[in-house]
Amino acid sequence: MSRLLNTVNTRLRRDVSFCRRLRTTAERSISCTLKNQAEERNGSVGVLGKRLQDTAETLIIGGGCVGVSLAYHLAKAGQKDVVLLEKSELTAGSTWHAAGLTTYYHPGINLKKIHYHSIKLYEQLEAETGQAVGFHQPGSVRIASTPARVDEMKYQMTRTHWHPTQQFLIGPEKVHELFPLLSIDKVLAGLYTPGDGHIDPYSLTMALAAGARMYGAQIYTPAPVTGLSPMPDGRWDVQTPHGTIRANRIVNATGFWARELGQMIGFAHPTIPVHHQYVVTATVPEVKALKKELPVIRDLEGSYYLRQERDGLLFGPYEKEEKMVLQDSWVRDGVPPGFGKELFESDLDRIMDHVEMAMEMVPVLKHADIINIVSGPITYTPDLLPMIGPYQGVRNYWTAIGFGYGIIHAGGVGKFLSDWIMSGEPPYDLIECDPNRYGKWTTVPYLCAKARESYGFNNVVGYPKEERFAGRPTSRVCGLYELLKDKCSMGFHAGWEQPHYFYKPGDEVGYRPSFRRTNWFGPVGRECKLVMEKVGVIDLSPFGKFMVKGKDSHKLLDRLFANTMPKVGLTNISHMLTPRGRVYAEVTITQLAPGEFMLITGSGSELHDLRWIEREAADGGYDVDITNVTDSIGVLGVAGPNSRKVLQKLTGEDLSDGAFKFLHCKSIQLAGVPLRAIRISYTGELGWELYVDMPQMAAVYQAIMEAGQEEGIDNFGTYAMASLRLEKGFRGWGAEMNCDTNPLEAGLDYFIKLNKPADFIGKQALQEIKSQGLTRKLAYLTMDTDNIDPEGNETIWHEGKVVGNTTSGAYSYSSEQSLAFGYLPIQLATIGQKVEVELLGKKYPATVVQEPLVLTEPTRTRLQKKTKSSA
């Protein structure tokens, strides 16, 4: 250890020239960088060398690997007038000093596709452009040294088998065979991914730039953007010192300058630079003696990655949140003028714990000399995921920002955004990266707290249902928060706190981490029984809520939704589709008065859906007024066989079946408070949703709870609602339906009115899909499990082959078995078909059954009336 540590003190300095040597032999114009920085500090800008064009179809701001990738993909796809503006030179910012890791692995389902497309692009980019990219693919191994890590790897394996990427769970001996310099004393298993590796970020960016130019894109440097002006027709005037370009759309791909660019048009993008360090050694004899390149390893307990760098090693740690450093001054004051290819001062003390763990795992490090420690800015969002796509609140403004792992994301994100821009819809579901998942509640203190937590938790075990609490609660709390916060396990939904399940005396408080059933299981069963037998109350305030009214409101909604519009006083479930006939959103629509509609959507898709609606309204020139009332209206759900009896005590309105029918809406007084009531419940039981002004919510809740004492009223949370909705066969948006599915294969035929006169978006595509016939279908599965339940995205097997995937799952407390929805080939989606669902490395028997397992209350009531009438 002494040689490694003794060389450190002489290497703790900023060293741009080192990073120049480190990447590849590709020539870097450092002198040009220094000149541009000096000119920026002096308020002047260098010469472009060519005339700035006047117009652009797509104008990309930012010349890192992500922005250049988008220019490459758009130009290759045939778009004319693709322009990229870079304030200094390509790769300035975070790209040039990145460690360049590439991996197929990602714990998220959809981001696996981004990684996959990146690697496939990088494999052929050199041949396409003639530019070397320095791509190495020795594979990678994620190290598990605790039983929980092994479970986590099994958990991830079942989420990978139905994707095209190869991935293997291997034992310690195979780990050592792949990485012979590793001490395997603590190694229990490894997750091996062939094809992983690393690439030279500078060379990658230059190859993408060469390809972009080859296909017709224009790249201008140095060309800082000094102003952005939206035009009435949705276009933009983009000002630079060299002139103004009018663009049909603009894309913010400016890395850690993203916040500053957004502020030009009134947006405070929640991005923040984080100090990330990695260490590079000189030649290590044992490494030099190897006959083939070592795979990248990720020691998850040590929280670092390590790879071969020529004949030495490179390793980068992720410090604990109390030790990591945020560059929060840049959030307050902006990035210093001239900063582009500079580094921060290194700090070995901050990463010393990880250095020691790396030396224990890879003993040759103890005798290695350090060449340098690189400490540079990378950009984080609160949840560590990038912000990709069009922005709500302004037309034709897109973002590709917040990349903590820009190198592996660049290729796939460039293709994803290019496909979306060219076709008018996302090529696949990626809502977890939607820039509109954040809102005004995303304050700077919240951003800093969550970024610190996300960085520090980078390699912790990722348990299902686990919550992280930094920065919470936000300003977005409903009127019940203070009443309920100490009685339940709260979940976080788009800034809101919402109860997952409630505690009773004797219950274990807080979440006990596990990949199996844990301390939530009993309380959730208790709440399901409550709703099925008595009456329960749930806080549904996080629902997104919009009011749409005006002369063209009915016409607009008829264009947007595949269902017919409800009459005044009625409610229905409707779906917005994409031009290809995919399900963009599921919305509950109520016509409150002639031409006045209330739209209710899920919490996670509030601004996602609002943007789609606003875009269609603007592009189509509809005379409508659209208002987001999400924060001003609270929602209470009251469900169960005793719900009518409880509510009837508080209102003079007749709530009987004959007077207040299913899917009807009325304005009523409840406990003296005016509100809107809709007879609907996502549990499938008799129930109402009550829409009340947020300041009155606590009073209404307390009145209901007091009125329901004799009926056994109590609280229930979203976990119970999820179990109950599965028993009733209710589909969930984001699971059974999304931009990867069409409504016919999802079993939503009842809500799709192909014969309605309006030419709704996706109608023609659906007609073609219907005429061609389906290739897969959503199936309803019962499972024979033990102490584990499906939750969605697990692999489905048949006769030893992967045939599909689950979309959601839960335990049915009514039937005492596990349930799941899953997509299967049409020939296997038949009642009685036997398949297997993989959970934690074990394949459990499953059977396709008739849905639903439990009839909904309206269906039961109809059957009872029919039975009585025929008797």
Image (tube, rainbow, N blue to C red):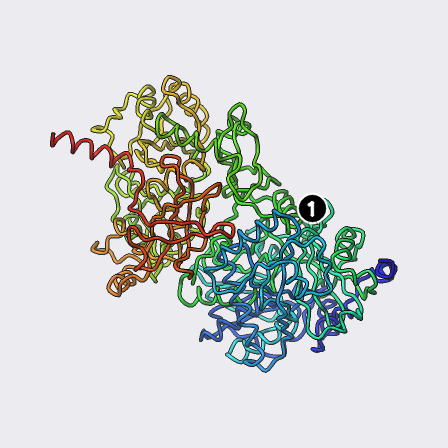
Q: Report how many numbered discs are placed on residues in the image.
A: 1
Helix or strand or loop: what does disc 1 sit on? loop
At 54% from the left edge and 24% from the top edge, which residue is drawn?
506
Residue 264, image x, y percentages: 57, 56
Q: Name the outermost residue toward the bottom.
A: 130
Q: Name the outermost residue toward the left.
A: 870
At 26% from the left edge and 58% from the top edge, which residue is drawn?
759
Residue 126, image x, y percentages: 58, 79
- Frontmost residue, 416 versus 329: 416
Residue 620, image x, y percentages: 33, 58
Neighbours of disc 1 within 10 Å: few (<14), some (14-19), many (20+) = some
Q: Is 813 on the left or on the right of 679, as rendered?
A: right
Residue 626 visible in this rendered orientation of the protein: no
Q: Quadrant of the C terminus?
A: top left
Residue 324 visible in this rendered orientation of the protein: yes
Q: Quadrant of residue 769?
A: bottom left
Q: Which residue is mark 1?
A: 321
| 632 to 379, vertically: above or below | above
Q: Quadrant of the N terminus?
A: bottom right
| 443 to 499, vertically: above or below | below
Q: Is 424 on the left or on the right of 287, as rendered?
A: left
- Frontmost residue, 12 versus 477: 12
Residue 719, image x, y percentages: 45, 37
Identity, as a three-letter code, of the amino acid under mark 1: Glu
| 216 to 70, vertically: above or below | below
At 74% from the left edge and 57% from the top edge, which residue is drawn?
361
| 489 to 145, vertically: above or below | above
- Frontmost residue, 309 versus 222: 309
Q: Is 835 on the left or on the right of 181, as rendered?
A: left
